[in-house]
Amino acid sequence: MDARTFGQVSVEFVLLSIIVLTAAFIAGRYMGPEYEWYCVKKAVSDAVAKTREQVVVGVTCRVGGQETEVSGNLSVVKYYVDDDKVEYELKYSGDNPAGVVDLLRRNVLLQVYVALYGRPKSVSEIPNPVKGSWANYQVEVSGGESIKVVVERTKE
């Protein structure tokens, strides 16, 4: 019996089998539905943070076909996440709540799409719900001074 074998199995075969099984486990864990949901939750968080920064600095955006200035203060009142939903409740103090809601909706949709597919050709072409590989992600933004952002995952 050779020193590099265990009975009829070589050391190289055992090591290669361990590496392949480990790689398959890692790929299944980190490239599956839970990783996709993690990326979407992170995208929503990034979009809320980006919108808060834009509102504090002041930004001009298009609402209903008109250019409008959005500025003020946007603060997070509540954050909730579970297996199939992420929810933010924000408080806006400023003079253009409709503009903030529109800006927030656009930013959240864009960031969710970018997390799943990369940059779109046009922001206006992003569908809602955004279809992922493992689920669909419905984005809802509503309110005025109190704004609610909800992204729900619906599995196919």
Image (tube, helix red, strand yellow):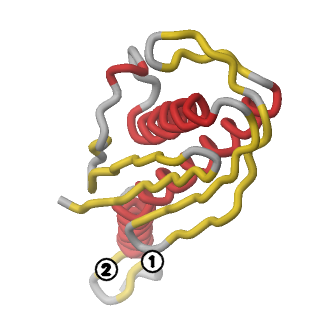
Mark yes or no: residue 144 visible. Answer: yes
- In the rendered image, which residue does mark 1 sit on? 4
Q: Pick the residue in front: 10 or 127.
A: 127
Image coordinates for residue 111, horizontal then vertical, percent = 51, 37
Amino acid type of disc 2? Val
Image coordinates for residue 60, horizontal then vertical, percent = 67, 15
Image coordinates for residue 131, horizontal then vertical, percent = 27, 43
- Secondary structure state at the residue bearing disc 1: loop
Q: Residue at x 52, y 48 (%)?
A: 143
- In the rendered image, which residue does mark 2 sit on? 9
- The image quadrant that residue 8 belongs to is bottom left
Q: Residue at x 46, y 41 (%)?
A: 112
The circle on residue 14 is none
Of the two numbered discs 2 and 1 in the rendering, the one whose residue sits closer to the viewer: 2
Q: Pick the residue in front: 27 or 86.
A: 86
Image coordinates for residue 75, horizontal then vertical, percent = 75, 51
Amino acid type of disc 1? Arg
